[in-house]
Image (tube, rainbow, N blue to C red):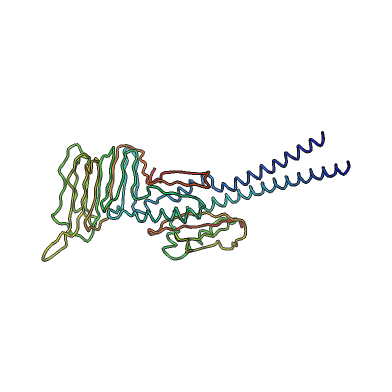
Amino acid sequence: MLKKGILFSLDAIFALVIAGIMITGCFFYLSQNKVSNDLYQISLDSLTLLEKDDTFANVLNSNLSTGLQTFLDGLSDQYCGNITLYSSYSSHLYSSTKSGCVGGNESSVGIRSFVYDSSNYYAKMEAWYK
Amino acid sequence: MKKGMLFTVTTVFLLLGVFTLCSAFMLSQQAYSFNDLKYIVDDVGDDIYLDLMETDISVVSGEHVLINLDQVDITDNRDSLFTSYENFIEGTYASKNNLEIGLENFNSTFYLEPYGGRRVMDGGVFYFYTGNNLINISIDFFVDETLPDDNSGQPSQDPGGDLIKVRFIRDGIVLSNYDRLQDGDNENSEFYQTFRDDGPPVVHDVSGAYVQYGNYNGEDGVLRVWRNNLNANISMKMYYSLADVKIFGGNISINHTGNLTLNSNIMIFT
């Protein structure tokens, strides 16, 4: 009788612990997802801005990624980012990473297409917290 | 009683954990929200007609609507560029975004609503089907390195028709200036201006431009513009009597894992 009671209690405790771990894990995952969404929006906004102000066109025209570097270095301190320009066939053309930033943290990636001189390109921005 | 209560509580907690896990999994599968798809529509369609046609389109709305087409290329429909862009978007771009994207009726034709107008390029001829509510059209040809000759003309006047103005301009000087009222339902003659080489001994017509407005192939109010060897920067202005114009091209459809879809016209001006 005593053994049965102990076994049942342990079983209940295990169940509660497992349920607790599952719930905690889900909330952790969802909070990470929100951070990822924020970074995703920052990536999209940045790429839109860089297309509209002709930074991408200037990089392709000048063969210099200075414009990308200047933009990334101007991001708020808490953000890190990397921007890469690709041809329509996914050939890597130009890339810049914000000074003082290294990868490793959880990041989010945004993509934007653009046309320059009748050819198709896309830009990819990876953003993460410092 | 206590055992039953404990069993119920643990079951509730376990089920809660399972439901939360399912919810998190569903959210992870729906990586795209509807707003994210709208961003994709904006990315794919925004300014794409202007970029591929290298034509500036602007609209001034007031009592009337003025539609400006600048840098109009009347020799090339650029459909190969549209096809290339469509392949890029439906292929590489869609793959990188983990989406299914389709572009339909994506070519250099665009439409004007509520006028029922459209612009079409075909065989080196620029067609503008003006639709309803047109007041007048002005076309300027900015030419260089050419000499006008006497081989020019304009159609006869149609009182009560739509006003069509055509000018040829070089270095800011108007070489010729035509304006005629033209019935949109008549098969009218064309405005034309040719240019010559400077000889001697024989002077030849070397280039020319032609504008015609009226009924064409059974449709009224069709503006046709074509040229012969003439290098010209062409600007067109169309005045309409109804405000709130919407200019759009083909259609884009986006599908994410079968349960989130978006279909939209590619807007040029709204």
Q: Please count the marks in the image.
A: 0
Q: Position of residue B18 (x, y in %)?
A: 68, 43
Q: Is residue B90 above or below residue A2?
A: below
Residue at position x 60%, y 46% in the image: B27
Q: Quadrant of residue A101?
A: bottom right
Residue at position x 45%, y 55% in the image: B91
Q: Position of residue B26 (x, y in %)?
A: 60, 45
Left or right of residue B197, residue B32 in this image: right
**Nearest the camera: A56 or B131?**
B131
**Nearest the camera: A95 or A14?**
A14
Extreme residue toward the top, this view? B1
**Nearest the camera: B40 or B259?**
B259
Q: Quadrant of the C terminus of chain A?
A: bottom right
Left or right of residue B201, residue A30 in this image: right
Q: Quadrant of the N terminus of chain A?
A: top right
Extreme residue toward the right, this view? A2
Residue at position x 31%, y 49% in the image: B69
Q: Quadrant of residue A59?
A: bottom left
Q: Position of residue B139 (x, y in %)?
A: 25, 48
Q: Quadrant of residue B73?
A: bottom left
Q: Position of residue B80 (x, y in %)?
A: 35, 56
Left or right of residue B68, residue A89 in this image: right
